[in-house]
Amino acid sequence: MENSKQIQSNLYGYARVSTKEQNEDRQIQALTEFGITEDNIFIDKKSGKDFEREEYQLLKKILKRTQNNVLVIKSIDRLGRNYKEIQNEWREITQDLKTDIVVLDMPILDTRQYKDVLGTFIADLILQVLSFVAEQERDNIRTRQREGIEVAKAKGKKFGRPKIELPKEFKEQYIKWKKGEQTAKVAMENLELKRGKFYMFVREYEGRT
């Protein structure tokens, strides 16, 4: 007798934001509405400059040692920062880890639904297009940021670490110390500075001269 009972899949969700200031609520809401429990949602708040994300790496370890898994993400760019990374992660998850992927923003990217050759071909083609678009969008954002900075600089706006205001008598005490006329300890006492603060001012002053 054929067993018609459907095997229950293990649902996992992954959400990522680039900074601690950004809010991941929209991604989490979409994942929970899909039916994923909060315990199975992994969240990283880290820049995309590398892919050594703790929660993502932990998730992949779980996928590696379990079976019948489905990974759900809100959008394709959660997998990587550029075309190559997205393609590599997709390949590792679907082929090496034998895990299905569901991309909520693009329903056709649901590997559970397209197991035949034509369906796989169409999904792979769309994946390549979306990966390329994600990389181009990232490049466009960087270009807009760079152009914005250049415009701001042209208007006189200053960027970078602001200069530290040195104590009024610092230069005089610094010169005496460098000439050997007094010790650093005496200079600190005269300026009423602790050691760490004194040498911070020293680095700042020497960086200006």
Image (cartoon, rainbow, N blue to C red):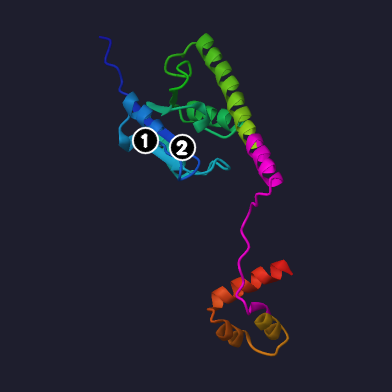
Image x and y of residue 138, in percent: 60, 32
Placement of the C terminus among the 4 image quadrants: bottom right
Q: Residue 16 carries which label?
A: 2
15 left or right of 209 in image: left
Tell me what residue is drawn at x 30 percent, y 32 percent: 37
104 left or right of 171 in image: left
Q: Which residues, given as a range, are shown in magenta?
A: 143-171
Callout 1: SS: strand
Amino acid type of the residue tagged 1 in the rendering = Ile
Tell me what residue is drawn at x 33 percent, y 29 percent: 32
Whether 197 is drawn above or below 110: the answer is below
- The Cα atoms of the two marked residues, 1 and 2, are separated by 11 Å
**Magenta residue check for 46:** no
Q: Residue furthest front?
A: 155
Placement of the N terminus among the 4 image quadrants: top left
- Camera sees residue 140: yes
Camera-nearest label, 1 or 2: 2
Tell me what residue is drawn at x 57 percent, y 35 percent: 81
Frontmost residue, 8 versus 148: 148
Badge 1 or badge 2: first in the primary sequence: 2
Image x and y of residue 6, in percent: 29, 17
Whether 68 is drawn above or below 165: the answer is above
Frontmost residue, 89 versus 206: 206
Tell me what residue is drawn at x 62 percent, y 76 percent: 168
Image x and y of residue 78, in percent: 49, 32
Residue carrying label 1: 41
Amino acid type of the residue tagged 2 in the rendering = Arg
Count residues near mark 2 (Cα–Cα under 10 Å), then give few for <14, some for 14-19, many for 20+: many
Count residues near mark 1 (Cα–Cα under 10 Å), then give few for <14, some for 14-19, many for 20+: many
